[in-house]
Image: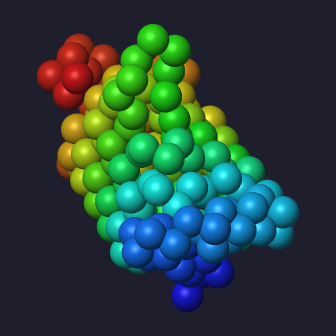
């Protein structure tokens, strides 16, 4: 099992059982050992992978991440100024290195987000998104022409 996910899981379970100091210590240890900030309050589904020991990953405590996701290094999942709503990420989502998912966005199931993408709008199920700001380039494995791009937004 991924040591970062295992550390998160132990801290999350302890936090849910109202042990407050142990999750705090585990989170601090994760910052030192793995150079990441994955809060114990965050809801992360089973089977989520953090390759490269989650190097540089920062996740807001109130973000929601589904099951079976793969989150590469240097990813940020958090809020945006002026919006109290945080990202919600579906199941089986692959987030490329250096991507940022910011603000009140919903990322659907089976989505791929390219490296360096900045997601500030919702992404529907079964899509691939790239760019700054991120835009959908594939839906159900079929490349989308610019004229059809608006149908996926």
On the question of residue 127 being in view, the answer is no
Image quadrant assignment for residue 62: top left
Tell me if residue 10 comes above or below residue 127 in the rendering: below
Residue 119 seen from this side: yes
Residue occupying the far right of the picture: 32
Looking at the rendering, which quadrant does residue 67 occupy?
bottom left
The residue lying toward the viewer, choosing from 143 and 22, is: 22
Is 49 on the left-hand or right-hand side of 97? Answer: left
Q: How many labels does the image show?
A: 0
The spot of residue 149 in percent (x, y) is 25, 21
Q: Nearer the viewer, residue 36 or 42?
A: 42
Quadrant assignment for the N terminus: bottom right
In which quadrant will I find the C terminus? top left
Q: Position of residue 108 (x, y in %)?
A: 25, 45
Q: Residue at 84% of width from left, 63% of height from top?
A: 32
Task: Tell me if residue 86 comes above or below residue 55 in the rendering.
Answer: above
What is the residue that sits farthest to the bottom in this orientation?
Answer: 1
The quarter of the displayed image where residue 122 is located: top left
Q: Nearer the viewer, residue 21 or 53?
A: 21
Residue 121 point in image, percent of width and height: 35, 24
Question: Is 137 on the left or on the right of 54, as rendered?
Answer: left
The vertical placement of 147 against 143, above or below, is: above
Q: Residue 46: image x %, image y %?
A: 37, 75
Instruction: From the viewer's perspective, tell me whether residue 35 is left or right of residue 149.
Output: right
96, 57: nearer the viewer: 57
Q: Which colour scheme is used?
A: rainbow
Residue at 63% x, 68% y is 21
Residue at screen point 68% across, 71% down:
26
- Residue lying at 33% horizontally and 43% vertically, measured from the top left: 88
Against 48, is 113 above or below?
above
């Amino acid at each position: 099992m991924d040591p970062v996910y295992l550390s998160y899981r132990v801290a999350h379970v302890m936090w849910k059982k109202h042990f407050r100091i142990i999750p705090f210590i585990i989170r601090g240890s994760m910052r030192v050992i793995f150079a990441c900030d994955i809060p114990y309050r965050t809801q992360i589904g089973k089977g989520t992978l953090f390759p490269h020991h989650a190097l540089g990953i920062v996740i807001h405590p109130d973000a929601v991440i589904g099951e079976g996701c793969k989150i590469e290094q240097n990813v940020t999942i958090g809020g945006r100024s002026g919006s109290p709503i945080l990202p919600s990420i579906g199941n089986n989502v692959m987030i490329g290195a250096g991507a940022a998912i910011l603000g009140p966005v919903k990322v659907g199931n089976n989505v791929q987000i390219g490296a360096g993408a900045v997601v500030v709008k919702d992404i529907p199920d079964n899509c691939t998104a790239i760019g700054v700001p991120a835009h959908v380039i594939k839906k159900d494995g079929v490349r989308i022409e610019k004229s059809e791009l608006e149908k996926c937004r």
